[in-house]
Image (spheres, rainbow, N blue to C red):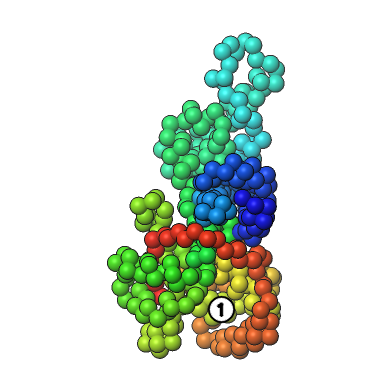
Amino acid sequence: MTAKNLQDLKDKVKYLGIPEKVYKTMEEALATGIPDVSVGTDDKIGQDKMAYLLNFHQGKNGDYYLNSVDATLTKGIRIFPGTVNEIDIKALDEEMGKTNWKIHRDMFNNMADLTETEYQVLRDQNRVMEKLMQLGSEGNERGMAVQELLMVKYFRDTVFAETIPDFHKMAAKHEVKQNFPTTIEESYTGKEMYNMMWGRGVKNEINPQLKKGQNQVAQQEVQDPEDATQDNAILKKKHQAYVILDFNVKTKKGNYLMKYFYRQTAEQVKKDGPKFNVARKAAELPYLERDDPKTFAWTIESLEKGNLTKVHFPIEGKSVPFTLETNLRTRSLTAKDMEGNIVPHAYLGKDQSVDVTPIIKKYQEYMVKNEGKNHSYYRRPAKAMVKVKTRGEELSL
């Protein structure tokens, strides 16, 4: 491995948006000369944690290439206000957050040898645990659900995790694991991986060499034959597609099936009508950022990357924040309030009779004027050498 090869790999990791703290470990691991090397790191996104295992392979020329990333999303537990079995859920959440869960009474052979501080910690634990158990008493289903959330939130990586039956099964409900390619055919940034693991679609550039090989498999696996891309002409050049994970189907390698939603050809639009257009769907909603072509362009680009995109709607004379996200399964945009609750479009003032053509026209004029400018917050990753094929399903959009 040369110094240039190492720098190229560092640049690629940077372009993927993966924390640069992995550089030192990466350099040490690659210096061993082992043909296949994996290096781990992690990152925090809001309340969620992303763990990345970077998989490198050494080519015949001695250089290393980053072929794929094993990503693990550990979802942060969100607790909302309420009362169950006379227990204030939010207050209990705050109390558990202040409690020391790093020690457990089973760690001490003789309770008489406890220090005053240790004794006080165990007393605090007992007091909080009594309230936690009260939540799920009398078979209260909501209380048991909140109880499980609080245990997963605070007992991960503690001794308590080993003392609670089926704890690891409970924790697994809040984890998603997926292997993502990072090759010249198909590559995803760390943020795009995160968005896909949350179930959101990501717009990506797909190389036809990979997709041609998948086409026959895709036609066999597609659930709705009328929705499949039948025209292979679209596969003759590099093209863009929205990609989502199908959490109901797993491949032989244990990955979730990746579904590819391609842009419709002119013939398909003429025959079936337009199925989904992010810009048009976004223009139908009366949020404040829509009226400025620049902020509207940023909104579209953010949605295409699969981000939860913050916008503001005029509600009762006030500017109220909400988030928008693409929903490829329903060919629509989903609006949520800041607590994550889905909000009907009618509440936001959507009017089906409004002509969005002027908004789209201004947006298109802005994009033409600013052609070549990158509105995204990260660049596309550099190319890799080794080809990796992932099974997928192809649909038209």
Q: Position of residue 267 (x, y in %)?
A: 40, 87
Residue drawn 61% across and 50% down? Answer: 1
**Closer to the camera in the image, 348 or 164:** 164
Picture coordinates of residue 269 (x, y %)? 42, 85
Q: Assess disc 1: are there few (<14), some (14-19) or many (≥20) residues with their C-alpha within 10 Å of its C-alpha.
A: many
What is the x, y in percent for residue 303? 57, 69
Residue 18 visible (yes or no): yes
Q: Whole-percent x and y of residue 231?
A: 36, 80
Q: Is residue 308 visible?
A: no
Q: Nearer the viewer, residue 198 or 254?
A: 254
Q: Is residue 366 left or right of residue 162?
A: right
Q: Kindly indicate the quadrant of the structure image that contains residue 388.
A: bottom left
Give the SS element for disc 1.
Answer: helix
Kindly indicate the quadrant of the structure image that contains residue 350: bottom right
At x 60% / y 63%, what residue is drawn? 381
> In front: 397, or 151?
397
Q: Which residue is mark 1?
A: 279
Q: Is residue 165 left or right of residue 76?
A: left
Residue at point 37% right, 66% down? 214
Image height of 324 relative to 277, above or below: above
